[in-house]
Amino acid sequence: MNFYEKYMNIIGPIGNIMFYLQAYKIFTSKSAIAVSGPGFFISVIGLSSWLFYGILLKNRPLIIANGFGVLGAILTLSGILIYGTFSL
């Protein structure tokens, strides 16, 4: 189990890199027109819930992966609010 926990500490954040890639594209192109604001807002809520759950369980892989994901999703959502149109 120790090996798998170390593996998850690495692969968890890698799975959330897509938020950072999307944020990079938004900030470099200065456009978020085709990006779903509500979708990323829902992602922030979901990732934050998993992060809180990981903290309650004191589960390091959950904390690391979802903490990384929350930051990336918030960064992306910030780009959407700055450069896009946020509508439902």
Image: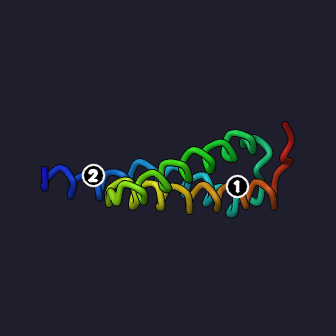
Residue depicted at x 36% and y 51%? 12
Q: Which mark is residue 77?
A: 1
Q: Quadrant of the C terminus?
A: top right
Residue depicted at x 42% and y 57%? 56
Q: Residues within 10 Å of mark 2 (few under 14, many from 20)?
A: some
Give x and y (percent) for residue 66: 46, 54
- Determine whether 88 is above or below 23 in the image: above
Q: Residue furthest front?
A: 56
Q: Residues within 10 Å of mark 1 (few under 14, many from 20)?
A: many
| Residue closest to the eye, 1 or 72 | 1
**75 horizontally vs 18: left or right:** right
Q: Residue furthest top?
A: 88
Q: Quadrant of residue 31?
A: bottom right
Give x and y (percent) for residue 53: 45, 51
- Amino acid type at image mark 1: Leu
Color style of the picture: rainbow
Q: Secondary structure at mark 2?
A: helix
| Residue closest to the eye, 63 or 32 | 63
Q: Secondary structure at mark 1?
A: helix
Whole-Å distance between the Cαs marked 1 and 2?
Answer: 26 Å
Residues at marks 1 and 2 touching, judged by CB atoms closer than 8 Å: no
Q: Which mark is residue 7?
A: none
Residue identifier under label 2: 8
**76 horizontally vs 58: left or right:** right
Give x and y (percent) for residue 78: 73, 61
Give x and y (percent) for residue 37: 75, 45
Residue depicted at x 13% and y 49%? 1
Residue depicted at x 27% and y 52%? 8
Which tag is nearer the camera, tag 1 or tag 2? 2
**43 horizontally vs 12: left or right:** right
- Amino acid type at image mark 2: Met
